[in-house]
Amino acid sequence: MKLVLWIAGMLIMLLNACVDVNNNPPQHNTETEKQVLNLSGRWKFNIGDKAEWKDENFDDSKWEK
């Protein structure tokens, strides 16, 4: 029983350390940290990482743009 209470106490302390009670957004130190980059354009996207994808002859025409 003491072990269960100890574990519960540790979990509560861990969760308390990870959660911002006031739900405040993170503070930015400079204007550049607030900048949002638009990555639309010629970039192609697919979830994952496979060695053959780096081959310049790989067909990525069906990837999301």
Image (tube, helix red, strand yellow):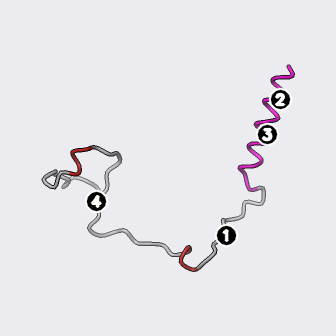
Asked if the residue under mark 4 is in contact with the one under mark 2, i.e. CB atoms within 8 Å, the reply is no
Image: magenta residue range: 1-20
Asked if the residue under mark 3 is in contact with the one under mark 1, i.e. CB atoms within 8 Å, the reply is no
Marks 1/3: CA–CA distance: 25 Å
Q: Position of residue 45 (x, y in %)?
A: 31, 56
Q: Position of residue 29 (x, y in %)?
A: 64, 75
Residue type at tag 2: Trp
Give the left or right position of residue 14, taking residue 44 as reference: right
- Which of marks 3 and 1 precedes in the sequence? 3
Q: Which residue is mark 2?
A: 6
Residue 50 part of the magenta-drawn span: no
Quarter of the image for residue 39 reads bottom left
Q: Which residue is mark 1?
A: 27
Judge whether 28 appears above or below 7 on screen: below
Q: Residue at x 57, y 80 (%)?
A: 31
Q: Which residue is mark 4?
A: 44
Judge whether 29 appears above or below 25 on screen: below
- Which of marks 4 and 2 precedes in the sequence? 2
Marks 4/3: CA–CA distance: 43 Å
Marks 2/4: CA–CA distance: 49 Å
Residue type at tag 1: Gln
